[in-house]
Image: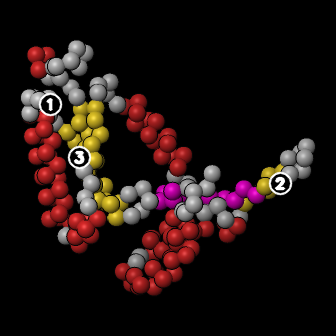
């Protein structure tokens, strides 16, 4: 089922104005990417007609752009990649934590990236370490991996660190639950 709004729809509706506003600051690669996504699975790229031999019902299957930035073309590749990554996961409990900035702070981060992101990561790390060290929670020192994502899946500015915490018990006596 087609979503109500796709990236290609945004490029069709606002792409020309965006390219004009960006002028020389927009490179050839970006222009080609926008054009490819805009044309993806449309008559612009051609296609073929599939017809049923029994009822003669026909449908057009348009060609895809195969651009690595295209959300329609890369959906299957993304699903395959996720499946491969799941095979790499350790068989231990883990937690995925996200710290999200309020929209007002995200707007400041857009123009002051280094400063705001440094504060964000420091606050996230201190928060996780403090909560984990508290004996009412875990009472342990933890380690984690954090990755900065600056855009959401809908291509809106949405800076947030995605944090992966592995629950590996290094010292048997620190483990509160059997099998942990």
Q: Give the secondary structure at mark 3.
A: strand
Q: Give the secondary structure at mark 1.
A: loop
Instruction: Confirm or deny contact between disc 1 and disc 3 (CB under 8 A).
Output: no
Q: Is residue 101 left or right of residue 86?
A: left
Crowding near the residue tagged with mark 2, few <14, some 14–19, many ≥20 C-alpha atoms within 10 Å:
few
Q: Nearer the viewer, mark 1 or mark 3?
A: 1
Task: Give the Cα distance between marks 3 and 2.
Answer: 49 Å
The label shown at residue 58 is: 2
Residue at the far top: name it.
Answer: 178
Instruction: Confirm or deny contact between disc 1 and disc 2 (CB under 8 A).
Output: no
> Can you identify the residue that label 3 sits on?
146
Percent from the top left, x then y, of residue 126? Answer: 10, 46
Task: Give the Cα distance between marks 1 and 3.
Answer: 21 Å
Q: Is residue 153 above or below residue 92?
A: below
> Can you identify the residue that label 1 sits on?
137
Say whether disc 1 or disc 2 marks the residue closer to the N-terminus: 2
Crowding near the residue tagged with mark 3, few <14, some 14–19, many ≥20 C-alpha atoms within 10 Å:
some
Which image quarter is the C terminus in? top left
Q: Is residue 71 above or below residue 164?
A: below
Say whether disc 3 or disc 2 marks the residue closer to the N-terminus: 2
In depth, the one of 122 and 114 nearer the eye is: 122
Q: Who's the residue at 8% across and 29% down the image?
A: 135
Task: Give the Cα distance between marks 1 and 2.
Answer: 61 Å
| Residue stretch rendered in magenta on the structure | 60-71
Percent from the top left, x then y, of residue 175? Answer: 16, 19
Percent from the top left, x then y, of residue 76? Answer: 54, 46
Crowding near the residue tagged with mark 1, few <14, some 14–19, many ≥20 C-alpha atoms within 10 Å:
few
Q: Who's the residue at 41% across and 84% down the image?
A: 21
Q: Is residue 87 left or right of residue 72?
A: left
The label shown at residue 150 is: none
Q: Is residue 59 left or right of residue 109?
A: right
Q: Is residue 154 left or right of residue 132?
A: right
């Amino acid at each position: 089922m087609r979503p109500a709004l796709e990236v290609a729809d945004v490029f069709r509706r606002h792409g020309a104005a965006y390219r004009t506003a960006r002028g020389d600051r927009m490179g050839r690669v970006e222009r080609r990417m926008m054009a490819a996504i805009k044309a993806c699975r449309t008559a612009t790229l051609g296609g073929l007609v599939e017809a049923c031999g029994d009822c003669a019902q026909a449908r057009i299957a348009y060609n895809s752009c195969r651009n690595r930035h295209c959300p329609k073309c890369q959906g299957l590749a993304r699903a395959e990649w996720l499946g491969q990554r799941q095979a790499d996961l350790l068989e231990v409990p883990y937690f995925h934590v996200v710290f999200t900035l309020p929209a007002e702070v995200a707007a400041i981060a857009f123009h002051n990236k280094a400063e705001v992101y440094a504060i964000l990561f420091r606050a996230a790390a201190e928060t996780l370490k403090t909560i984990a060290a508290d004996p009412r929670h875990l009472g342990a020192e933890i380690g984690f991996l954090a990755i900065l994502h600056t855009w959401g899946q809908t291509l809106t500015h949405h800076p947030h660190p995605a944090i992966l915490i592995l629950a590996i018990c290094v010292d048997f006596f620190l483990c509160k639950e059997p099998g942990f």
